[in-house]
Image: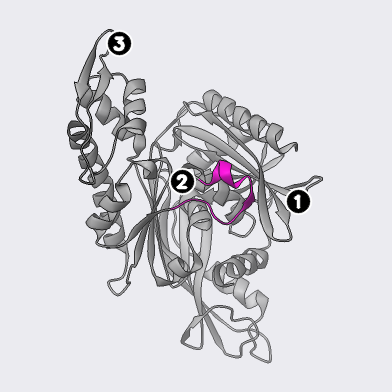
Amino acid sequence: MSKSSYGTTIAGLDIGTTKTCAVVATSTPEGLDVIGVGEAPSTGLRKGVITDLEETVRAIEAATEKAERMAGVHISHVYVGVTGEHVHSTNNRGVVSISGEDHEVARSDVRRVVEASKLIDVGADRQIIHALPRQFAVDGHDGVSDPVGMAGTRLEVDTHIITAGNTFITNVLKCVHRAGLEPAGIVFEPLASSASTLLAEERYVGVVLLDIGGGTTDVAVYSGGGALHTSTIPVGGNTLTNDIALGLKTTIAEAESIKRTYAAASSNGHAEADFPVKSLDGKTLRRVTPAQLRAIVMPRVLEIFRLAKAHIESTLPRDVVLAEIVLTGGGAQLRGIDQMAAEFFGLPARMGVPTSVGGLTDAVRKPEYATAVGLVLFGPKGDGAIWNGRSRTFFGQIASWWGEMWN
């Protein structure tokens, strides 16, 4: 974060498989205003994992430079989004005795109990990047949102813990440093996307977020106000593009154009005209019907939904009730995908776009900007693993997280 004529500025960096996006926001009395957006094509990642350091550095530099020019400020620190199959999550419970002669819960007790919940075996090759409190209990009474000041002898907390592979995180940070930036924090991308697209009421009643990116689909499940499950599926929009290229025997570039222009998950009962497709050599055209294209598109979309459902069913308690599906990311722009999701999951479904910021809202109110915008929202309030190169004071993390979650 830095100071400008606007106020305190915050930057988020979404290093995606298809594109790298930087967003700059400034604090105002009403909240955050987006003042700069920049993006550049990504060619150095596969399924969310860096495969070419130099290409990734160039994409970061290009995206941040564009955002800086639009905002008129210099970016020095960024909240960095990470994703990939190397990121795992679990739920754990911590328990401590309440210290102090008056047996009143103090901030130090909150810090200790959250630290106690992090005592899990993550392996030498992994690190905890988030420990998100969901609820506290004092002397066995559950459902406490903020225990500070309450009287008791035993304090417990349920946390959602997210871990990531050390080498993957190291490579991301190396690219950020080589681009001349300092990481203000590391954020698992579905948490960021949730921060920018989900309503507080949705997080309470039970919601599934599916962030369909180019190389991966991120999954986040919320209930009771907190995260219950987060994961990444190694299938995204690029896989769908490849399917179209193979099925229609055309180039990847032509397949991407067809996907954006003609692909749909349903016909909605309307008559549809066929469309031209270039051959691999680009010398001939042939006509393809929308029904033929849907026969290629729908199986892959259903696969994403099946994988997401399997992830959710394997981890969630049976008594958890879900009320809605929210689709975001570039893949959410596929026409009719919300209707298809509603039919598959048996729940209402909607498209998620960033709604919690002001400023350049027309530029970012699109599902593909959910993660980048969410990074500037969640980063300062969340539990990032890095803060200006040092560990953050833990109560500051807890206080800001609970303030954002419950207020």
Q: Is residue 355 magenta?
A: yes
Residue at image location 58% in from the left, 70% down from the top: 402
Number of the front mark, 1 or 2:
2
Across and down, in percent, residue 129 comes to 53, 53
Q: On the image, numbered disc 1 is attached to which residue?
A: 8
Q: Earlier in the sequence, mark 2 or mark 3?
A: 3
Cα distance between the residues tagged 2 and 3: 32 Å
Instruction: Compute the Cα span from label 3 to label 1.
Output: 51 Å
Circle 1 Cα neighbour tier, 10 Å, few/some/many (<14 / 14–19 / ≥20): some
Marks 1 and 2, Cα distance to the nearest angstrom? 26 Å
Q: Residue at label 2?
A: 367
Residue at point 65% right, 88% down? 104
- Number of other residues with Cα within 10 Å of mark 3, as a class: few under 14, some 14 to 19, many 20 or more: few
Residue 60 in percent (x, y) is at: 59, 31
Q: How is the image coloured?
A: one colour
Residue 396 is drawn in which quadrant? bottom right
Which residue range is magenta in the image? 352-365
Q: What's under tag 3, amino acid-wise?
A: Gly
Task: Using the image, determine if residue 281 lies above or below residue 27.
Answer: above
Q: Label 2: few (<14), some or many (≥20) within 10 Å?
A: many
Residue at image x 45%, y 29%? 51
Residue that carries the numbered disc 3 in the rendered image? 282
Between circles 3 and 1, the one closer to the viewer is 3
Label 1 vs 2, first from the N-terminus: 1
| Residue 381 relative to residue 75: left or right | left
Taking the magenta stretch, the answer to whether it contains residue 29 is: no
Position in image of residue 13 (x %, y %): 58, 41
**Mark found first going from the N terminus, 3 or 1:** 1
Helix, strand or loop status at disc 1: strand
